[in-house]
């Protein structure tokens, strides 16, 4: 089990810039992806996450203040769900406003480090596949629909999906997958 007494410092960075330029940490350049590219890119992450969650040491943090692969996997599982809900909201309502999601609070409340890796892998896979299927069904005309995050950051359907995809890819980099 993960030592839950060592708290991870909250990530307070505004990562929205990843849709405009390549990430220097993970090397991903998601802002160049077209809407049609995103379903396949989502599905390409699934076997990599499954492998990371099945690897030895999945519960071990590389440093006390860095999430374990299991904790990152549980976070990405939830990212799939949160962004899927935001996408559905944007498709239903142009200019939709997103409720705040505190990822650090979700990790603590969800006790990510105590979850079963195989269950997280299955849930992550199902959520990624469901999101990819819905993204594949989006008409090109809908990619400019807008949504607003609680901090005021504005997204289009396309930029939201690019931003979301970076999260999953970046965390694969974090866990060495």
Image (cartoon, rainbow, N blue to C red):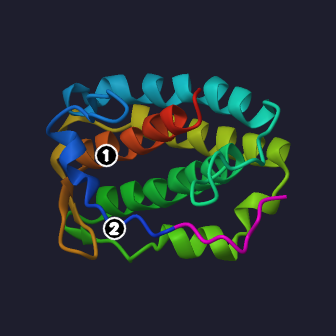
| 145 up-or-down from 174: above or below | below
Label 2 sits on a secondary structure element that is: loop
Quick check: can you spot residue 142?
no
Tell me the CA gap for discs 2 and 1. 16 Å
Residue 46 image point, x, y percent:
62, 29
| 164 up-or-down from 153: above or below | above
User: For residue 113, which quarter of the picture?
Assistant: bottom right
Q: How many numbered discs?
A: 2
Q: Which residue is mark 1?
A: 163
Label 1 sits on a secondary structure element that is: helix
Query: For this rendering, which residue is in front, 116 or 88?
Result: 116
- Name, please, the residue furthest toward the front: 63
Relative placement, left or right, of 102 versus 90 is: right
Of the numbered discs 2 and 1, the one sitting upstream in the chain is 2
| Residue 69 magenta-highlighted | no
Region of the chain picked out in magenta, as a range: 1-8
| Residue 7 magenta-highlighted | yes
Query: For this rendering, which residue is in front, 62 or 53?
Result: 62
Relative placement, left or right, of 125 versus 165 is: right
Quadrant assignment for the N terminus? bottom right
Query: For this rendering, which residue is in front, 55 or 118?
Result: 55
- Check residue 12 in the rendering and tell me which mark sits there, or answer none: 2
């Amino acid at each position: 089990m993960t030592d839950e007494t060592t708290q991870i410092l909250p990530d307070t960075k505004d990562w929205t810039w990843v849709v405009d330029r390549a990430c220097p940490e993970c090397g991903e350049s998601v802002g160049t992806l077209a809407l049609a590219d995103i379903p396949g890119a989502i599905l390409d992450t699934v076997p990599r996450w499954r492998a990371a969650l099945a690897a030895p040491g999945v519960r071990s943090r590389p440093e006390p203040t860095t999430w374990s692969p299991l904790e990152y996997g549980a976070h990405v599982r939830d990212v799939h769900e949160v962004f899927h809900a935001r996408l559905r909201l944007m498709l239903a309502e142009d200019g939709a406003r997103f409720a705040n999601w505190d990822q650090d609070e979700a990790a603590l409340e969800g006790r990510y480090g105590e979850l079963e890796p195989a269950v997280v892998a299955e849930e992550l896979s199902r959520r990624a596949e469901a999101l990819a299927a819905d993204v594949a069904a989006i008409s090109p005309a809908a990619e400019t629909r807008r949504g607003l995050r609680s901090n005021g950051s504005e997204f289009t359907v396309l930029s939201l999906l690019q931003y979301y995809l970076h999260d999953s890819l970046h965390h694969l980099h974090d866990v060495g997958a």
